[in-house]
Image (cartoon, coloured by chain):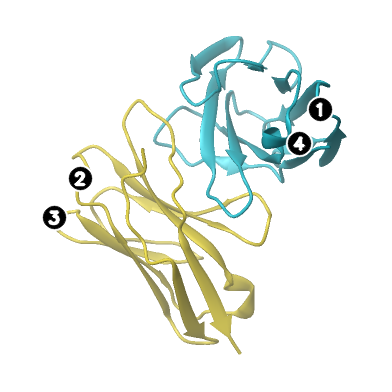
Amino acid sequence: DVKTTQPPSMDCAEGRAANLPCNHSTISGNEYVYWYRQIHSQGPQYIIHGLKNNETNEMASLIITEDRKSSTLILPHATLRDTAVYYCIVSPTGNQFYFGTGTSLTVIP
Amino acid sequence: NAGVMQNPRHLVRRRGQEARLRCSPMKGHSHVYWYRQLPEEGLKFMVYLQKENIIDESGMPKERFSAEFPKEGPSILRIQQVVRGDSAAYFCASSPLGLDYEQYFGPGTRLTVT
């Protein structure tokens, strides 16, 4: 089952940082946090994942709290093309990805 | 390096017919996952396969649905005797190794049952 909680929707001004929160209070010690996004009706796109440490790649940064019960995906300079549904997923060891309903991010010009 | 390919992209079937959805994973990937997305909902896991093996099918409906990933050729998701409730987008994903690695998704097959 889904093990994460995300706000259903958020707005962000173009050019500003978009900070998308996710709660995963029941996460186990060996479970990773993954972020994907789905633009319109396309296939989900991998963004980033992490275990304990903060991670950064060319798309985004992932900040995981020390107790690992929550995380934040940061898109540093949001563009209109970042408008999408963003999914935070906790990967249960030995099991599959469960997608919830995610956060619908709208980037406003 | 081609991504995950799915075909057909759109499929229309009448109630009672069979639907076959194909997925070719990325080159070098031997793990395939199928997901279903109903309108206005998130993706729901259906099945996880490796070459010639079904690893986890806990998300598959018990009847009418089956999946395979043969040694040669694409993975196939088969739906027999389709009903209107099967209308959805079906996504395939692949990964180079197993779980706890990122999955790369295809563009999906939109199935419409009339």
Q: Characterize the local packing of mark 2: few (<14), some (14-19) or many (20 or more) Cα atoms within 10 angstroms.
A: few
Three-letter residue code for mark 2: Thr
Q: Which image quadrant for residue B29? A: top right
Spot the residue most to the left: A67
Choose mark 4 or mark 2, whichever is in front.
2
The image shows residue A86, relative to residue A98, as above or below, that is below
Query: Numbered disc 4: what chain?
Result: B
Front residue of B72 and B80: B80
Locate the C terminus of chain B by quadrant: top right
The answer to whether marks 4 and 2 mark residues whose Cβ atoms lie closer than 8 Å is no
Chain seen in yellow: A
Q: Is residue A68 left or right of residue B4?
A: left
The answer to whether marks 2 and 1 mark residues whose Cβ atoms lie closer than 8 Å is no
Query: Numbered disc 3: what chain?
Result: A
**What residue is pinned by disc 3?**
A67
Choose mark 2 or mark 3, whichever is in front.
2
Front residue of B91 and A8: A8
Q: Characterize the local packing of mark 3: few (<14), some (14-19) or many (20 or more) Cα atoms within 10 angstroms.
A: few
Q: Are discs 3 and 4 both within one chain?
A: no
Residue B28 in view here: yes
**What residue is pinned by disc 2?**
A26
Q: CA distance from mark 2 to mark 3?
A: 11 Å
**At 72% across and 46% down in the image, what residue appears?**
B107
